């Protein structure tokens, strides 16, 4: 194991090696060489101004040297950058007390208690400070090992990352994981008897917790990859779905087709929004409920699969979409249980918070592009889809074979949803022959007594696209040689009513 002397010589020869200087700082700190540790910490601070652990060690070093005001300045600056890190408040409260600023220490502990009502030491500290049980430290007081925000006792090692923590802390200063509690902690050994500590990352690599973190990460990444491939395949398959009727212009014949043709872009945008919103919602929910993630980037490892699952759910059959929020809500709750450490009530609160945030993002997206109608009318749309899309030949309506001449009216019936009526307005009126004829048939389609199509038919079939609107009538007239057998058909999502 590399000692202080070797590391010091290496850093002097390679002043740009900040990682090695950081290792040296921790060794100097654990060896109680605080003056030398401070010199290197100030250098590291310039290189790593946003590294939380550097600021915590810097504050703890000032604290050990009795420079309480400097420690307070460092911690207050850190809290301006990381206002939700409870351990910073714990460290600041300890420094305030040692500096003789009892009222301010009490206020900090009260903040901690407001965030974490079950904090094991906050209430006792507040009670003690308000009773005035405090001994102002003499100017040259030697601080005990357990009084630092970063202790070196071996009895309080973080089970998640292997970092050393002081006995008064409830969460690890490095990874914010919950720490084991000890009713009767053993006194800290003299500094010279403390075993040198490796880098936390190295120490954690061989622990069961590290194996669990790797397994969790691999599971999250693998699940996200599988769902990502599934989402791509679903999208491609829907773009390339076949139309089974030759000679007929491609139009939506089912409610599912209407959603696929008109909402694909919205689905893609929604999927992209969810890929950002769901991990962010889990992250915010964890902060709001002061929960500790079990692994780093847990909100991404859980949020990405949930977002991809939600995107895939938008391609379900329309009558099944109503059940998707229930399934996604259950998956999100299981994800919260998996990624957060804390009480069941807090995890339940985090689940509720992320649900509101994700649902809010989805609601804003849909309303801003399609309005409120598709959401308000979704039960009606789902019920119509269940009846219409499950027919043997959905969207195809045949009239009994007829003989020329033929005159009939076609009136379109509403689906019950104004939004669906608007988007499902494509229809085709088709006339087919059993066999070719020598003299052409004349086919005319009228709407509101205006001719919109007038064509001739001699063989196979003819298809005339029209716009279907509830309550609007189209008149079909076929004339030509008498007694020619013809087969009228209508292709549409809106159900036609045939009137002689």
Image (spheres, helix red, strand yellow):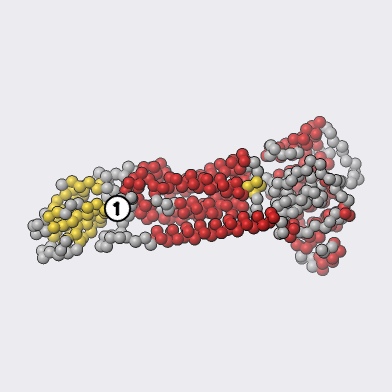
**Which one is nearer the viewer's eye here, 239 or 73?**
239
**138 left or right of 453 in image:** right
Q: Quadrant of the N terminus?
A: bottom right
Tag 1, which secondary structure? Answer: loop
- Residue found farthest to the top: 131
Residue 413 position within the rendered picture, expressed as x and y whole percent measured from the top left:
27, 45
Instruction: Check disc 1 and report the residue beneath it.
Output: 392
Mark 1 is surrounded, within 10 Å at the Cα level, by few (under 14), some (14 to 19) or many (20 or more) other residues, namely few
x and y, in percent, of residue 26 in the image: 80, 56
Residue 358, position in %: x, y? 52, 46
In the rendered image, the residue lying farthest to the front is 208
Residue 368 visible in the shown view: no
Note whether residue 239 is visible.
yes
Which residue is at 89% across, 55% downward?
Answer: 192
Q: Horizontal placement of 297 versus 262: left or right?
A: right
Q: Is residue 287 left or right of residue 27?
A: left
Residue drawn where x is 83% and y is 41% of the image: 98
Name the residue at 79% across, 67% down. 14
């Amino acid at each position: 194991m590399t000692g202080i002397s070797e590391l010091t010589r290496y850093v002097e020869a390679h002043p740009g090696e900040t990682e090695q200087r950081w290792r040296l700082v921790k060794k100097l700190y654990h060896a109680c060489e605080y003056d030398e540790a401070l010199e290197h910490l100030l250098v590291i601070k310039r290189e790593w101004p946003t590294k939380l652990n550097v600021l915590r060690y810097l504050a703890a070093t000032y604290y050990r040297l009795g420079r309480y005001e400097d420690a307070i300045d460092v911690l207050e600056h850190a809290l301006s950058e990381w206002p939700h890190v409870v351990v910073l408040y714990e460290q600041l409260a300890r420094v305030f007390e040692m500096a003789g600023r009892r009222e301010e220490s009490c206020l900090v502990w009260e903040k901690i208690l407001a965030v974490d009502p079950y904090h094991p030491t906050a209430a006792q500290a507040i009670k003690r400070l308000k009773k005035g049980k405090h001994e102002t430290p003499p100017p040259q007081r030697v601080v005990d090992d357990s009084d630092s925000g970063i202790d070196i006792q071996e009895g309080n090692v973080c089970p998640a990352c292997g970092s050393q923590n002081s006995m008064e802390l409830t969460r690890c200063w490095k990874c914010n994981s919950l720490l084991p509690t000890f009713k009767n902690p053993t006194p800290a050994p003299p500094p010279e008897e403390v075993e040198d500590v490796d880098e936390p990352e190295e120490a954690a690599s061989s622990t069961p917790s590290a194996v669990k973190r790797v397994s969790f990460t691999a599971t999250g990444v693998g699940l996200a990859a599988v769902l990502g491939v599934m989402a791509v395949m679903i999208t491609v398959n829907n773009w390339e779905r076949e139309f089974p009727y030759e000679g007929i212009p491609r139009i939506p014949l089912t409610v599912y087709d209407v959603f696929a043709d008109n909402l694909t872009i919205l689905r893609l945008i929604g999927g992209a929004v969810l890929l950002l919103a769901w991990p962010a919602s889990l992250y915010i929910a964890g902060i709001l409920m002061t929960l500790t993630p079990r692994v780093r980037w847990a909100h991404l490892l859980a949020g990405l699969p949930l977002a991809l699952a939600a995107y895939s759910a938008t391609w379900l059959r329309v009558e099944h979409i109503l059940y998707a929020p229930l399934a996604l809500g259950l998956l999100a709750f299981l994800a919260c249980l998996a990624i957060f450490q804390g009480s069941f009530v807090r995890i339940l609160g985090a689940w509720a918070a992320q649900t509101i945030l994700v649902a809010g993002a989805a609601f804003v997206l849909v309303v801003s592009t399609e309005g409120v109608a598709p959401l308000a009318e979704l039960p009606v749309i789902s019920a119509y889809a269940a009846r219409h899309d499950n027919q043997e030949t959905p969207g195809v309506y045949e009239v009994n074979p007829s003989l020329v001449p033929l005159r009939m009216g076609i009136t379109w019936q509403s689906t019950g949803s104004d939004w669906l009526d608007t988007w499902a307005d494509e229809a085709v009126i088709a006339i087919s022959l059993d066999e070719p004829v020598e003299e052409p048939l004349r086919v005319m389609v009228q709407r509101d007594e205006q001719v919109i199509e007038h064509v001739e038919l001699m063989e196979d079939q003819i298809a005339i696209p029209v716009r279907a609107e509830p309550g609007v009538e189209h008149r079909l007239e076929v004339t030509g040689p008498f007694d020619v057998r013809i087969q009228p058909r209508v292709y549409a999502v809106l159900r036609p009513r045939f009137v002689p």
